Image: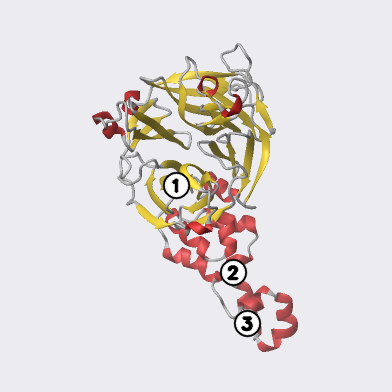
Amino acid sequence: MADACNSRSLSWLVKPCRPDPRREIIAHPSLEIVHHHHNLRPSAVASASAAAPIMSLPDDLLLECLSRVPSSSLPALPLVCRRFSLLLDSPAFLRLRCAHGRLRRTLHALALSDLGLLSSTSLPVDAPLASAWAPSSASAVLPLEALDGSFSFSHARVAAVGRSIYIIGRGATLRYDTWTGAVAPRAPTIFPRKKFAAAAIGGKIYVAGGVARASAVEEYDPTADAWRVVAEAPRQRYGCVGAVAGGVFYIAGGLRVGGVGGEGGRLDAHVCAGSMDAYNVEAGAWVRGRPGAGTVAGAAAAVPGGGCVVGACGTGVHVYVVASHAVELSFWRWEARARRSGGGEWARLEPPPISARAGLGGALRFSCAAVGEEKVVALVHVSVGCGGGGRRGSDAVAVEGAVLVYDIKGGEWTRGPDLPPGLRRAAVACVEF
């Protein structure tokens, strides 16, 4: 089927779901025979049976039909009926789209303020990243009274599940539908978090860190709209980032809160800044590193030569990490040799073409996302401080909102289209549909 919208085929798919006075007779064949056969001519009964709607198909066959619909027609399908909406939200639909080679990847950048406004923009990434971002739009998210009074999105994390992007803040969670632009509140995390790690695995979202007095790892089920604690992390991290590879949730970087060397809520930057903890979701167990093998005790891995992890994402069995070394940046790929052991290997890659000096006097932030197993996209932000070299320089202006694209196969960075003005401190996520 061509990717262009075929109005005739789409109308055939949608028409059977529209209200029809004959639908009740078709939907209840036994009643039709016993009570209504005297009101219909035999030819009419045969015609109605032959024209059974697509909704009479079992879920697996209906999913096959829906998975072959052109991408341009997908946003209209959830509006047909609730069954269509549920099937299009299911993991099976995404698997079938992938099997049929019909996935369309789109990069989304979102910035949410505590005033209840969401700014978003998107960029198709199936072709080379040479086109411009779609026009930015801003819409009122919710009346503030609809959320917990202690909510904050100043350091929110994002995670994509299906066509939805979940924006997780301190005391509040929002679901952003990338097809319709609708935003709806969802259950907040059990523990209010700030500057934490988040990632999606198998249709569920996992968060860790960002809490001073708890080390709980939480799992979110979008279908049930509920969070639950699934594990206790080996370290209480603050300012960490999350990544997923090979079914493992990696919690990288940040400062250690509490524990040895950090009692009373003190922050210890030297223990966690360059290390990763790894939680095997399927096994429900932590991947343990081997002390003396280049890892921190109990951690999956540590970036060689130190450095502070400032960005990370995963694809396939690899984790890609951006690390800051005060005056330079480095870029690494981690590959675990075994999912349940601490063994693995780091490979140093070409660093991103941004000087770490661009953040002097402020902060250099990265939001990273994998585009399939082909590219890594790093969205760069610079926040300039007010004192001690906080004057905005030419380097800072040049990289604010920069989009850097790493070609995994070619091993090279290129510069993508910069983020539109007005989306500062945005987070980036890739949606595949």
Q: Which mark is residue 53?
A: 2
Callout 3 touching callout 1 (CB < 8 Å):
no
Q: Which mark is residue 5?
A: none
Q: Nearer the viewer, residue 62 or 344?
A: 344
Q: Which residue is mark 1?
A: 104
Tell me which residue sits at (44%, 35%) in the image. Answer: 368
Which amino acid is tagged 3? Ser
Q: Nearer the viewer, residue 204 or 3?
A: 204
Q: Which mark is residue 43?
A: 3
Tell me which residue sits at (55%, 47%) in the image. Answer: 171
- In the rendered structure, which disc, 3 or 1, sits on the residue that comes first in sequence? 3
Q: Is residue 91 left or right of residue 385?
A: right
Q: Is residue 13 above or below residue 170?
A: below
Q: Nearer the viewer, residue 44 or 357?
A: 357
- In the rendered structure, which disc, 2 or 3, sits on the residue that comes first in sequence? 3
Q: Is residue 370 above or below residue 188?
A: above
